[in-house]
Image: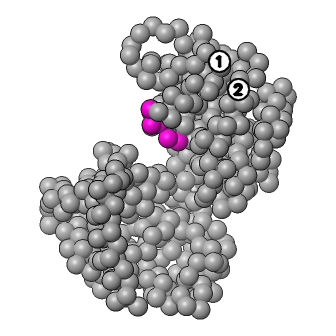
Amino acid sequence: MLFLYNLIVLFASQVIKILAIFSPKMKLFVDGRKEVFSKIREKIAFSDKTIWFHAASLGEYEQGLPVIEKIKIEYPNHKIVVTFFSPSGYEVRKNNTVADATVYLPLDTKSNAKKFIKAVNPELVFFIKYEYWPNYLNELKKLQIKTYLISGIFREKQAFFKWYGGFYRNALKTFDYFFVQNDSSKKLLQSVGFNNVKVSGDTRFDRVVSILERDNSLDFIEQFKNNQTTIVIGSSWPKDENLLVQYINNASENVKFIIAPHNIKSEQIQELKNSISKKTILFSDVQTGRDLSLHDYDIFIIDTIGILTKIYSYADIAYVGGGFGNPGVHNILEPATFGVPIVIGPNYSHFAEASALVNQQGCISISNQNELNDAFNLLLHNEDERHEKGHICSTFVQMNKGATAIILNHICNNS
């Protein structure tokens, strides 16, 4: 089976090179991997002690960040190497300050695995949430390098738990320990013979709790808000925006909206702006430095990345996008940690935190225009309801923090 897997990886590597001719994202994927080993040689000496963290993309990086930060404190003489599989993670966080070297993970071939692990020479390795690359894992096991999965989550439909899943289960045998998000993941692993597992919870809660300790102020948002009730719309997609624009265009004049779309390509931003009948300004307009009297505008479109988390601190109500697509809603924990009531689309069942907050009534799920209108109107016109739902959200986050401490306690006492 491993032979067949390696053939598939080899074939995929050639297909990706062809796709890179036509796709900017695939070009980043290919070109970025050409520089991996030169960057490692530049940043990591063979004599350095290192710890390696692998994240599939941006979400997994943010999830692992609390552990990375604590590991740096516990292991001050080690260098940190962070790898990404996806361009959408690497390109956003390639200049992070927490890692000594941040690179793409070379494709999972035997030769790449041997070369990369030899170059990095890690003492500890952490895979965040998922991604199980057999050649890398086999090489780590062969070299007896301690390897951990953190914030892992498993579902019954995965191949690990099927009759034909022997090859995939073998990949799991290479891990020294699993730190999983919930009891169901632990029971699934135990059902196929893995007892080296602990329910630690989700490190994302530690990540969002830490947000409260930093300065989240943004002068231009404060000027725009001007002490008025504000709805922040984060990571919206066109299917979300079709409903939201209808509401915005008919909303009362004493409500302001901040929209941070998932896709910030200029043509789509302009299309969104043109669909709104109220006085609208873009973040890129603010960057010109002109005095724009921000308080005079009703709608603020954020056509940049990296500031949405801080913007949520100004929200009275949040709408988090993605819930009309697959796999579903984006990160709701960031507005939740600020005690903001949340509205989302109908596709959220794959996200435990969204399901929990809908059940606890801190978050409202809507499926159509009428339900969106009712949800916003309820939260705008019933201040007690708005505050109660916000309190449910912030309490939920606080009650679920602590995963990082569990992981670090085990690592420090067993390594």
How far across and how far down the image is residue 48, in percent? 18, 63
Mark 1 residue element: loop
Q: Residues within 10 Å of mark 2 (few under 14, many from 20)?
A: many
Q: Residues within 10 Å of mark 1 (few under 14, many from 20)?
A: some
Dot label at residue 141: none
> Alpha-carbon distance for marks 2 and 1?
8 Å
Dot label at residue 248: 2
Q: Which residue is mark 1?
A: 278
Mark 2 residue element: helix
Q: Quadrant of the C terminus?
A: bottom left
Residue type highlighted by circle 1? Lys
- Residue 152 is at least partly visible in this image: yes
Between 168 and 247, the one nearer to me in the picture: 247
How far across and how far down the image is residue 410, in percent? 48, 69
Quarter of the view holding residue 386: top right
Residue 91 is left or right of residue 291, and the answer is left
Decide: is 8 above or below 391. Answer: below
Quarter of the view holding residue 13: bottom left
Decide: is 394 above or below 120. Answer: above
How far across and how far down the image is residue 88, in percent? 41, 51
How far across and how far down the image is residue 207, in percent? 52, 49
Decide: is 164 above or below 212. Answer: below
Residue 302 is left or right of residue 92, and the answer is right
Q: Which residues are magenta?
A: 262-266
Most common secondary structure along the magenta stretch: loop
Q: Residue at x 34, y 89 (%)?
A: 3
Q: Residue at x 27, y 80 (%)?
A: 110
Whether residues under marks 2 and 1 lie with C-beta atoms below 8 angstroms apart, the answer is yes
Residue 66 is left or right of residue 246, and the answer is left
Queried whether the magenta region covers residue 264, the answer comes back as yes
Between 288 and 414, the one nearer to me in the picture: 288
